[in-house]
């Protein structure tokens, strides 16, 4: 199994012309980027620049609306748009957290029927504000719609549960891992979806807990015979990244945090692949 370090563009303020060659030099081989709001000229520019710098594209999409039918219509439109970017895979923020379980199940059943017509893997992110916002809601939906593929972002669940929830339920972790195709390697803590700085020693318990969970995901992905795993160190800018009051100065450098996490997970993956432990 191959690791594909993937760089998101959330919080990147310089141009693609400047950022893409830097990401390539830093060791990333793919970029994750929202594409549904790009114009035709921007889309062509994105495809050209990513190809020039050897970066595959992971489109990030967001379904919109209130009802199940509105989100399904949105889903079909944006997935069709994403196909134009020759995607490595597609990551979707899908559905709405306010739905009943029956509505969420109906939505994902229909989504999986639509996905059967596409060769590229389409993954649904475990994200607050969506039906997969908690581990228990996700568990219940997976049991009824077992063909769902996930982007696992466990930082949201730590925030929702206000604890390192997957330490308590290895069976649930294995269930989720068996549906995961893409990882968002951000570290959450009880008070929020992003620790202020993952390099700080006071957040080592959270960092190591997430590391253990991702290792389980890798184990289950390898058992399923997957050829690759994309990992995005998706630390975000303010207000995900803490800022000092009054001065609005960030407490850490966003790019440095992302690169630290990318290097950490690359080293861990290499050790895991060689059987040397992590």
Image (spheres, rainbow, N blue to C red):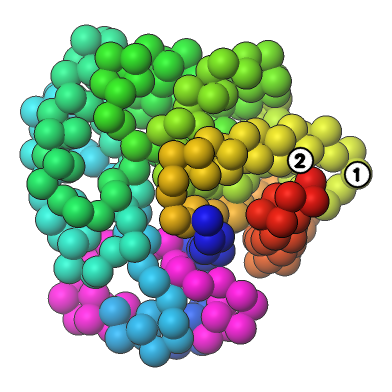
Residue at point 42%, 61% (across, down):
32
Viewer-closest of 125 and 226? 226
Viewer-closest of 202 and 107? 107
| Residue under pointer 1 | 201
Where is residue 260 drawn, in percent x and y?
74, 62
* Mark 2 or 1, nearer chain start: 1
Please, is residue 236 above or below residue 75 in the view? below
Relative to 11, 180 lies left or right: left
Q: How many marks?
A: 2
Q: Residues within 10 Å of mark 1 (few under 14, many from 20)?
A: few
Please, is residue 115 above or below residue 61 in the view? above
Queried whether the magenta region covers residue 131, the answer comes back as: no
Queried whether the magenta region covers residue 44, the answer comes back as: yes
Q: Which residues are magenta?
A: 21-46
Which image quarter: residue 254?
Answer: bottom right
Q: CA distance from mark 2 to mark 1?
A: 9 Å
Residue 207 numbered tag: 2
Where is residue 275 drawn, in percent x and y?
74, 50
């Amino acid at each position: 199994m191959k690791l594909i370090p993937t760089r998101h563009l959330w919080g990147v303020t310089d141009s693609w012309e400047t950022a893409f060659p830097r990401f390539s030099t830093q060791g990333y081989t793919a970029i994750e980027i929202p594409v549904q709001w790009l114009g035709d000229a921007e889309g062509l520019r994105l495809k050209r620049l990513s190809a020039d710098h050897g970066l595959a594209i992971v489109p990030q999409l967001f379904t919109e609306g209130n009802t199940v039918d509105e989100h399904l219509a949105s889903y079909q439109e944006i997935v069709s748009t994403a196909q134009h970017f020759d995607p490595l895979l597609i990551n979707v923020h899908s559905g709405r957290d306010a739905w009943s379980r029956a509505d969420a199940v109906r939505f994902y059943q229909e989504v999986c029927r639509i996905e059967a017509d596409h060769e590229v893997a389409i993954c649904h992110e475990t994200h607050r504000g969506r039906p997969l916002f908690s581990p228990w809601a996700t568990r219940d939906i997976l049991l009824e719609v077992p063909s769902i593929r996930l982007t696992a972002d466990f930082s949201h669940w730590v925030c929702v549960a206000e604890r390192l929830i997957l330490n308590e339920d290895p069976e649930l972790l294995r269930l989720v891992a068996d549906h995961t195709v893409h990882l968002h390697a951000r570290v959450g803590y009880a008070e929020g979806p992003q620790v202020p700085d993952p390099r700080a020693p006071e957040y080592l318990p959270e960092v190591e807990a997430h590391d253990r969970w991702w290792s389980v995901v890798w184990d289950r992905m390898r058992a399923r015979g997957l050829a690759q795993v994309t990992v995005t160190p998706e630390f975000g800018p303010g207000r995900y990244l803490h800022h000092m009051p009054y001065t609005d100065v960030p407490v850490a450098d966003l790019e440095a945090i992302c690169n630290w996490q990318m290097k950490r997970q690359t080293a861990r993956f290499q050790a895991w692949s060689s059987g040397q432990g992590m």
